[in-house]
Amino acid sequence: MENSNSKKQISISEIITLMGAGYTRTNTARNYNPEIGCIQDYYDLPKDQVKLLFEHPKLANVKTTKVVVPMFDLVDDTTTSTEDVNASNIPGVTANEEPVTETFTNTNTYNTFN
């Protein structure tokens, strides 16, 4: 029989952090990923003890955060280099010139009432 001094100390915040990192409750859970792990294996608990653990009010509704690993490396090629001192946010306009804005004014008046 196990004595009270050998009980594990498990913190609620650690459980929430693990679940946020993708840990599931058990190794038979629907979204279980063996590369990430589960609470049951992390604390070496039997399944009935994991069930008891998640009966705590602060853990009852905690769900595993699905970890999505991108299958690509995104490269930001929109940044300008520091050498390009004439760079502008407006395409076709350098920083030291103003964009050309044309306004049409009709100075001719026509009298159509004769």
Image (tube, rainbow, N blue to C red):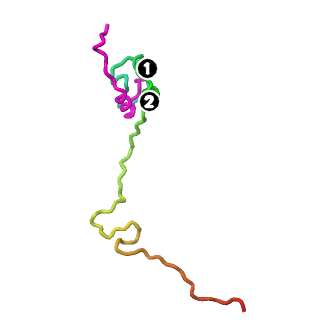
How far apart marks 1 and 2 lie (CA) works out to: 13 Å
Left or right of 23 in this view: 104: right
Q: Position of residue 28 (x, y in %)?
A: 43, 23
Q: Quadrant of residue 4?
A: top left
Q: Is residue 46 above or below residue 89?
A: above
The N terminus sits in image quarter: top left
Mark found first going from the N terminus, 1 or 2 = 1
Mark 2 highlights which residue?
Answer: 62
Left or right of 86 in this view: 26: right
Image: magenta residue range: 1-28
Based on the picture, tell me whether residue 38 belongs to the magenta stretch.
no
Mark 1 highlights which residue?
Answer: 51
Q: Tell me which amino acid carries mark 2.
A: Val
Q: Is residue 56 above or below residue 75?
A: above
Residue at the farthest bottom position: 114
Residue at the farthest front position: 57
Q: Are marks 1 and 2 in contact (CB under 8 Å)?
A: no
- Report the residue at 43% width, 31% height from top: 64
Q: Secondary structure at mark 2?
A: loop
- Report the residue at 34% width, 68% height from top: 87
The C terminus sits in image quarter: bottom right
Q: Quadrant of residue 113?
A: bottom right
Q: Position of residue 24 (x, y in %)?
A: 41, 28
Q: Quadrant of residue 95?
A: bottom left
Q: Tell me which amino acid carries mark 1.
A: Lys
Residue at the farthest top position: 1
Based on the picture, tell me whether residue 10 belongs to the magenta stretch.
yes
